[in-house]
Image: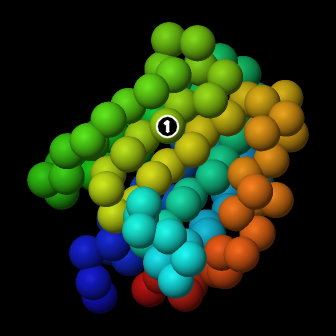
Amino acid sequence: MDESRKMALMAVEALEDKKGADITILDISGISILADYFIIANGSNRNQVQAMSDGVEEALGQAGYVPKQIEGYQSAGWILLDYKDIIVHIFSPEDRDFYDLERVWRDGKEISKEDLM
């Protein structure tokens, strides 16, 4: 398993562990140089969104991965965790509907967790 797939799988499992909702994995490797995968999820409230972010950061950190950048943690409407090969987007439900990344990145291929294994 290559590194970006391994990272994406760990991030998805961390989001699931924190009861993240509507987790979407987009393979953008064929359409962008930004990253290989976007992982998009939402929580039901600010505390859950932050807990999901903390969970991803902890899981990837224990494996030795350090985020290049984290944005939006304090407001918790949209937290972005940039790990170079993967970018994790954690939203409030309202912000996820508003920004609609799945539509913006519709040229990416939606894959399942099993596809990462």
Residue type highlighted by circle 1: Leu
Q: Is residue 103 above or below residue 32?
A: above
* Residue under the image location 73 percent in, 51 percent down: 101
75 relative to 87 in the view: left or right: right
* Residue under the image location 80 percent in, 47 percent down: 100
Where's residue 106, x and y in %?
76, 69
Where's residue 50, x and y in %?
52, 24
The colour style of the image is rainbow
Q: Classify the position of the C terminus by image quarter.
A: bottom left
Q: Specify few, some or many for label 1: CA neighbours under 10 Å numbering under 14, 14-19, or 20 or more.
A: many
Where's residue 51, x and y in %?
50, 28
- Residue linked to disc 1: 80
Residue 54 image-quadrant placement: top left
Residue 98 image-quadrant placement: top right
Q: Is residue 6 above or below residue 34?
A: below
The residue sitting at the left extreme is: 64
52 relative to 66 in the view: left or right: right
* Residue under the image location 33 percent in, 72 percent down: 4
User: Considering depth in this image, is 5 or 13 the residue closer to the camera?
Assistant: 5
* Residue under the image location 66 percent in, 80 percent down: 109
Where's residue 69, x and y in %?
32, 35
The residue sitting at the top extreme is: 74
